[in-house]
Image (cartoon, helix red, strand yellow):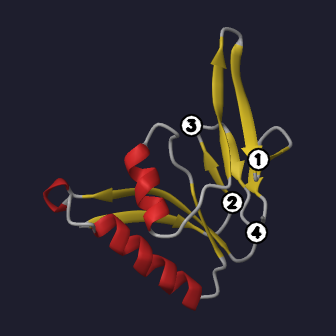
Amino acid sequence: VHIRWLYTRPVYLPYLGRTIDLRPGEVYSDEAYILPAYRGRKLYRRTLSLLGSRLADLGVRRLIVLSASWNEIIIARLEETGLKRVGECGVVRRVWGRRFYALGAAREQGRRAFSVDEE
């Protein structure tokens, strides 16, 4: 019914052209899907809440989730579960190429990686 990919090590994100650098105790959640027949039943919120509890039991201190800034539904669901926005990163397309940017707690690390700082 619900599928979610979790990473505990650095992972390359092709849409950003960067690797997210995870520190010990951090987990990155990439892509989550709920089958269409089960949408509208608050499963996203429930599974994220259960995931948070389980990760805390395993010693994870931080769950990092990236979402498109225009995806207001997912942002609302993330905030409903207690997650908060601490930064922004993305790619700006220009005539002569793409330019990565990082704002807030998101920090660029060299030309190929980024991380999310502690608050």
Q: Are marks 3 and 2 in contact (CB under 8 Å)?
A: no
Q: Tag 2's secondary structure?
A: loop
Name the residue that disc number 1 marks: 113
Residue 23 bears which disc, if any? 4
Q: Does 86 sit left or right of 34 as displayed?
A: right
Circle 1 residues within 10 Å: few <14, some 14–19, many ≥20: some
**N-terminal-most mark, 1 or 4:** 4
Q: Are marks 4 and 2 in contact (CB under 8 Å)?
A: no
Distance of label 2 from label 1 (alpha carbons): 9 Å
Q: Amino acid at mark 3?
A: Tyr
The C terminus: image quadrant: bottom right
> Number of numbered discs present?
4
Circle 2 residues within 10 Å: few <14, some 14–19, many ≥20: some
Name the residue that disc number 3 marks: 15
Circle 3 residues within 10 Å: few <14, some 14–19, many ≥20: few
Q: Amino acid at mark 4?
A: Arg
Q: Are marks 2 and 1 in contact (CB under 8 Å)?
A: yes
Circle 4 residues within 10 Å: few <14, some 14–19, many ≥20: some
Q: Does 84 sit left or right of 86 as displayed?
A: left
